[in-house]
Image: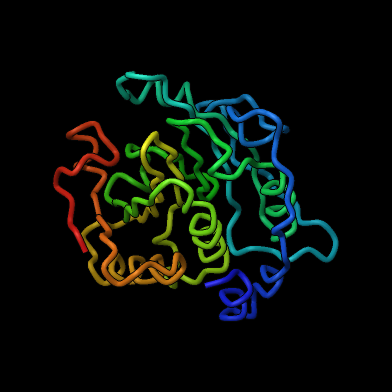
Amino acid sequence: MSNHTMAKDNNRYAALEQDQTDTTTSESSETPSSQAQQNTIAEHPRAKCVPGPGEHVLQYTYSVWFAKKPQGAQRSAVNYEQSIKLVGSFCTVEQFWHLYSYMNRPNDLGNNVDIHVFKDGIRPMWEDDANKHGGKWIVRLRKGLAARCWENVIMAMLGEQFMVGDEMCGAVLSVRYQEDIISVWNRTSSDTGITNRIRDTMSRACTLPTNTIMEYKAHTHSLRDNSSYRNTDVFVR
């Protein structure tokens, strides 16, 4: 499904239809933006986003984060907070495209890199109050296939096409050596009606074949096995 088609489904965010295929990438494969800020999650205040004249305001303000996991490093809440950096925040369609146009696409990023797009005020951490009772849908993609799916998932999220209101927390792109992984996070892992709706919208946004395996993992399980994507306590579609 193209960005144009998805945007038509929600006239409130018709500005998402604009063609942004000719975008600029940053010079370094280690950072997604030439304008990346260096403050960490712990230092990040709530964004004070001001819409410009005539800009199309989104329902929520979002922040973009970048993290590169050191090879072989074990995750802990402390070192994770230190490793993830704020790229920028936005609250309008135009501000998003301005930020996004400077970001490297998945194929241009190095391995063990994560890009997070989360509602402002929600840290992209299992331990955050908004996430601790939630979970995420996971889609694993062959190398080279993530760029369009990632962009479409972001468009669906910003355009409120998941239709689950405040349940949506954010989305993550994880670039790994043999695969790329896209996940969508929500607040309540126990609500199957909401999680199923998120799964179906994510599948449509990525135009996934019907036999594609999608996994749902609660963050309580991630905290227990200290892994985002290990196949432990995962519900498979």
Q: Residue at x 70, y 35 (%)?
A: 26
Q: Residue at x 41, y 50 (%)?
A: 182
| Left or right: 51, with 214 as reference point | right
**Residue placed most toward the observer, 34 or 225:** 34
**Residue placed most toward the observer, 28 or 171:** 28
Q: Position of residue 224 (x, y in %)?
A: 17, 34
Determine whether 53 is above or below 134 in the image: below
**Residue furthest toward the left?**
233
Determine whether 32 is above or below 1 in the image: above
**Residue furthest toward the right?**
53
Q: Position of residue 207 (x, y in %)?
A: 43, 69
| Left or right: 190, with 138 as reference point | left
Determine whether 77 is above or below 198 in the image: above
**Residue placed most toward the observer, 95 or 183:** 183
| Left or right: 204, with 195 as reference point | right
Determine whether 79 is above or below 56 in the image: above
Q: Position of residue 15 (x, y in %)?
A: 71, 70
Total residue callouts: 0
Position of the C terminus, as image quadrant, is bottom left
The scheme the figure's colours follow is rainbow
Q: Residue at x 64, y 80 (%)?
A: 11
Q: Residue at x 46, y 68 (%)?
A: 205
Q: Position of residue 219 (x, y in %)?
A: 26, 44
